[in-house]
Amino acid sequence: MTTWARILAVFDLETTGVDVDTARIVTAHVGVLDVDGTVVHRRDWLLDPGTPIPAEATAVHGITDEHARREGLAAAVGVAEIVTALRAVLGDGVPLVAYNASYDLTVLARECARHGIAPLDRPSPVIDPLVLDRALDKYRKGKRTLEVTCAEYGVTLEGAHDAASDAIAAGRLAQAIAWRYPGELAVDAAELHELQVEWCRRQAEDFQAYMRRVRDPEFVACGDWPVRALEVSRTLA
């Protein structure tokens, strides 16, 4: 297996919504997988986001206002702990896997700003199976949700939209992609991070061009990765 995929940290959030600037964290998972995809360390969080959890969000992840208020950590405490856990694994040089990383890492950055917590400083190396799959199997038709992409690579996803299940499946998916494309991904984690920055930028440009051609001539797609610039996400809101 490609060297970077032998030990991976994994990360996922479940939140109150899809807008990275307003979404609040409800649940989170940070774990570590070994070369076989076995979980060797994990930490899970339930937060009280401090705002009502919309019914449509509860329908996705199952967490109600009552549950979050009764059992969740105060948002500022939970956000600080999540950042500390991520900083530790990245500080050890372990690549961090997150599916659609620009969502989760941007939400976390906005939560840090909201609560006066020092954010991750240019988190790296990050591995995003969504960006990898789009770059390496560019012309495959169909959706690229985590569930669909896991099925494509033979990875089991149990309990979709649970932060732990999604994070662990994403890590195993990154390993499966590494097995399928050993030549294309035969680089170290730092180089792969930089490749993904460029791939994501190109993917956004292609998607923007397509949308402007077929649907909306003023459509804007964000290519920032792994964290969206604040002014960009505001423009897209």
Image: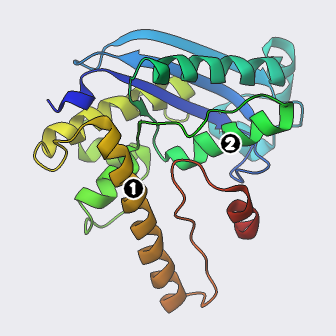
Crowdedness near tag 2: few (<14), some (14–19) or many (≥20) residues, C-alpha within 10 Å: many
Residue 83 drawn at (x, y percent): 64, 24
Residue 148 visible (yes or no): no
Outermost left residue: 183
**Residue 224 lies in quadrant:** bottom right
The C terminus sits in image quarter: bottom right
Disc 1 versus disc 2: nearer the observer: 2
Q: Which comes sooner in the sequence, label 1 or label 2?
A: 2
Q: Which mark is residue 203?
A: none
Residue 52 drawn at (x, y percent): 88, 37
Q: Secondary structure at mark 2?
A: helix
Q: Residue type at mark 1?
A: Arg
Outermost top residue: 40
Classify residue 154 as left or right of residue 206: left
What residue is shown with label 1? 144
Q: Residue at x 36, y 30 (%)?
A: 171
Classify residue 58 as left or right of residue 198: right
Residue 30 drawn at (x, y percent): 53, 21
What residue is shown with label 2? 107
Residue 231 drawn at (x, y percent): 74, 62
Against 187, residue 76 (above or below) is: above
Crowdedness near tag 1: few (<14), some (14–19) or many (≥20) residues, C-alpha within 10 Å: some
The N terminus sits in image quarter: top left
